[in-house]
Image (cartoon, rainbow, N blue to C red):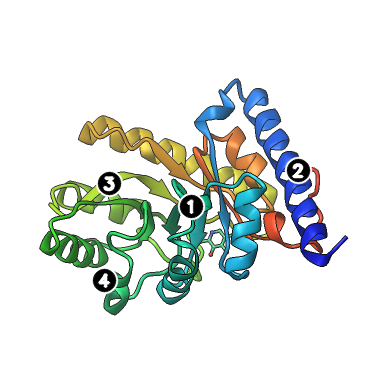
């Protein structure tokens, strides 16, 4: 078997294990697994691996660099096999790169400040678009993490949802690394904050983007509707572990 064939087989087997684990985590929480979208974070692999992942069943991808997003769309965008596939922007977005992203992604996960929300809105509106976005919240309070603090978001939300060029679809967060209890508190905190903001604004805020390779099962148990999976999808050296 060629190296590509072996990798394709790995991608398929890994995907089915991930799908099973998401279903089991949803069942533990009494949730319908169809509520949870898993996106394959392709930031560390090239277009060839994305195409193999598509063949293995992945239909949604996440990128964290506008330039890399562009490279993959150019390489793959016209292929019939990629019809219906979506890309999301999940990483920090610099203001001067916003135009490279608007209109090319299904969802921007990383609106981390009111200032950035305004900048994306202005650029989308100039092109007659409304960009679907998530507001990134620093639930855990770690200084290394970007995003609105919960209190900043409470204070900003009414102005942010009035911006004409963005449609706020929900919230996104990142959990502390290697800390299962901290991750669980972070995810439940995101869910509770979304519930509070739904009541206050009347918005559906239907998307909760949380959970990565190390903690996606905890995230699904705590209400995530979108898990962003990189290493566990693409890296043959990454061992899926039982959750803590
Ligand atoms: C890289 C990245 C992921 C995927 O992380 P893994 O631990 O590889 O699953 C998810 N979200 C964001 C924002 C990322 O930058």
Q: Quadrant of residue 170?
A: top left
Q: Position of residue 241 (x, y in %)?
A: 80, 48
Give the spatial CA distance, label 2 vs label 4. Answer: 39 Å
Q: Which mark is residue 143?
A: none
Which residue is at the far right?
A: 1
Q: Quadrant of residue 230?
A: bottom right
Q: In the figure, is residue 167 to the left or right of 75?
A: left
The answer as to whether callout 2 falls within 8 Å of ligand 1 is no
Identify the residue under disc 1.
80
Judged from the image, the secondary structure of the residue bearing numbered disc 2 is loop
Give above or below for 194 relative to 69.
Answer: above
Give the spatial CA distance, label 2 vs label 1. Answer: 38 Å
Give the spatial CA distance, label 3 vs label 1. Answer: 31 Å
Number of on-image labels: 4
Q: Nearer the viewer, mark 2 or mark 1?
A: 1
Judged from the image, the secondary structure of the residue bearing numbered disc 4 is helix
Say if mark 1 contacts mark 4, CB within 8 Å: no
Of the numbered discs 3 and 1, the one sitting upstream in the chain is 1
The answer as to whether callout 3 falls within 8 Å of ligand 1 is no
Identify the residue under disc 4.
99
Identify the residue under disc 2.
243
**Quadrant (top left/top right/bottom left/bottom right) for the N terminus:** bottom right
Q: Nearer the viewer, mark 2 or mark 4?
A: 4
Judged from the image, the secondary structure of the residue bearing numbered disc 1 is helix
Of the numbered discs 3 and 4, the one sitting upstream in the chain is 4
Q: Position of residue 165 (x, y in %)?
A: 16, 55
Label 3 Cα crowd, 10 Å radius (few <14 / some 14-19 / many 20+)? many
Of the numbered discs 1 and 4, the one sitting upstream in the chain is 1
Q: Which mark is residue 168?
A: 3
Of the numbered discs 2 and 3, the one sitting upstream in the chain is 3
Of the numbered discs 2 and 1, the one sitting upstream in the chain is 1
Label 2 Cα crowd, 10 Å radius (few <14 / some 14-19 / many 20+)? few
């Amino acid at each position: 078997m060629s190296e590509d064939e072996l990798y394709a087989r790995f991608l398929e087997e890994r995907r089915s294990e991930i799908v099973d684990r998401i279903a089991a985590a949803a069942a533990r929480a009494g949730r319908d697994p169809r509520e949870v979208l898993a996106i394959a974070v392709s930031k560390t692999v090239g277009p060839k691996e994305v195409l193999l992942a598509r063949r293995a069943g992945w239909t949604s991808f996440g990128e964290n660099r506008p330039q890399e997003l562009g490279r993959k769309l150019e390489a793959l965008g016209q292929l019939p096999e990629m019809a219906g596939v979506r890309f999301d922007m999940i990483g920090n977005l610099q203001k001067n790169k916003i135009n490279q992203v608007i209109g090319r992604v299904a969802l921007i996960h990383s609106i981390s400040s009111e200032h950035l929300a305004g900048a994306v809105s202005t650029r989308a509106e100039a092109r007659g678009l409304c960009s679907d976005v998530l507001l990134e919240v620093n639930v855990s309070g770690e200084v290394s993490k970007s995003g609105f603090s919960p209190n900043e978001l409470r204070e900003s939300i009414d102005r942010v949802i009035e911006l004409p060029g963005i449609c706020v679809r929900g919230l996104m967060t990142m959990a502390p690394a290697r800390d299962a209890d901290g991750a669980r508190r972070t995810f439940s905190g995101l869910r509770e904050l979304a519930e509070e903001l739904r009541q206050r604004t009347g918005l559906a805020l239907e998307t909760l983007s949380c959970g990565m390779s190390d903690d996606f099962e905890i995230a699904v148990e705590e209400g995530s509707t979108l898990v962003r999976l990189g290493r566990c999808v693409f890296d043959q050296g990454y061992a899926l572990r039982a959750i803590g």
